[in-house]
Image: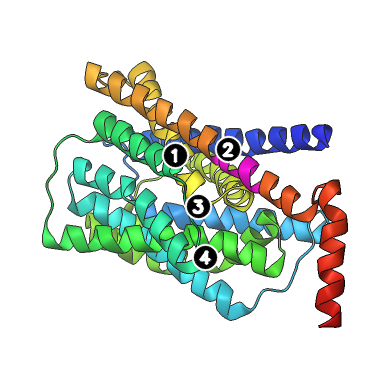
Amino acid sequence: MEEKKSSSSISDAGAWSINIISSIGIIMANKQLMSPTALHFTFATTLTGLHFCVTALVGLVSNASGYSVSKHVPMWELIWFSIVANVSVTGMNLSLMLNSVGFYQISKLSMIPVVCVMEWMVHGKQYSRQVKIAVFVVVVGVGVCTVTDVKVTANGFISAAVAIFSSSLQQISIGSLQTKYSIGSFELLSKTAPIQALSLLVTGPFVDYCLTGKLVSDYAFSPAAFIFIIVSCGLAVFCNVSQYLCIGRFSAVSFQVLGHMKTVCVLILGWILFDSQLTLKNIIGMGVAVAGMVVYSWAVEADKQIKSNNTQIFIQPDKEDAPLIKHIQLVQSKV
């Protein structure tokens, strides 16, 4: 039992590590790709379509080689999920364009309580006081180290609200679909990726034109741009797969809370690699956020242990009480 638990913990840590490394890597690659002082490829929605195109190709090869087994999921659920995921991508891009960086960060932070409320409403999930406190500490810490100016317009607020709702719904739906159809994370991703790739590659250039006023067909591709697009797409495969793995193994709330470790890492790497300013406020905020993540992990494990003990007590009554329980069951059967 201990060996199985240790193996599961190693797998969990591996899934988180892959997600954090690939997410940070893709942020750094996209920063170089989209920066006005570098390659200036500003077509984020089209790039996301390319990410899912490569992911779909990997899934197709995996299924053809027999590495993964395809399970049936109704097409209408796959289309519905893809629409929600695409709205999330578009909403986030619009929110970043229309709002200040400060409000964009706040909107991303608000996904944690929104996911909590949605999981409570949809699945009836309850959270202990320790978990709630830890979530609050993480939100405060990340807010302190990332939020700067906060300016918002009516259109920006609407786009942020749509992005928050659709992104939260997407993350909850990943876990729900995996549980409902007993399907693995990679199998589910291989089914949804082609739909998302096709729809984003068709609509992406129009969305990007509305956001930037430029057509992707007018972009002067260079060998460096091709290399960074390929690197970005490769990292996106690991990022997408690990996201499905993490949400399948944990919960949407845990993915959001511990996922903010990526924010802390990006700030540190930005300071090391890109000469970004790292102030005392950033350092204090990162310290508070990391402390909150540690407390959250401890609180979740404590809740699991309590539920496990309660289940064992319920299933395995004390030996001294066994005759009494049998007597009660005998009386009930006669009645």
Label 1 sits on residue: 130
Label 2 vs 4, first from the N-terminus? 4
Identity, as a three-letter code, of the amino acid under mark 3: Ala
User: Do the residues bearing badges 2 and 1 touch, measured as CB atoms within 8 Å?
Assistant: yes
Mark 3 vs mark 2: which is more N-terminal? 3
Task: Tell me how far mark 2 sits from mark 1, CA to CA.
Answer: 9 Å
- Name the residue type under label 4: His
Q: In terms of sequence position, does the residue under pointer 4 or pointer 3 come before the other?
A: 4
Which tag, 1 or 4, sits closer to the chain's start?
Answer: 4
Q: Is residue 252 above or below residue 101?
A: below
Residue 157 in the image: x percent, y percent? Answer: 19, 59
Label 3 residue SS: helix
Q: Quadrant of the N terminus?
A: top right
| Residue 191 part of the magenta segment | no
Circle 4 — which element? helix
Nearer to me, 84 or 330? 330
Closer-to-camera residue (165/51) = 165
- The residue at which mark 4 appears reads as 123
| Residue pointed to by mark 2 | 302
x, y percent for residue 285: 30, 26
The three-letter code of the residue at mark 1 reads: Gln
Foreground tag (3 vs 1): 1
Q: Nearer the viewer, residue 224 or 330?
A: 330
SS at mark 1 in the image: helix
Question: What residue is drawn where x is 51% and y is 37%?
Answer: 299
Q: Crowdedness of circle 2 by 10 Å Cα count: few (<14), some, many (20+)? A: some
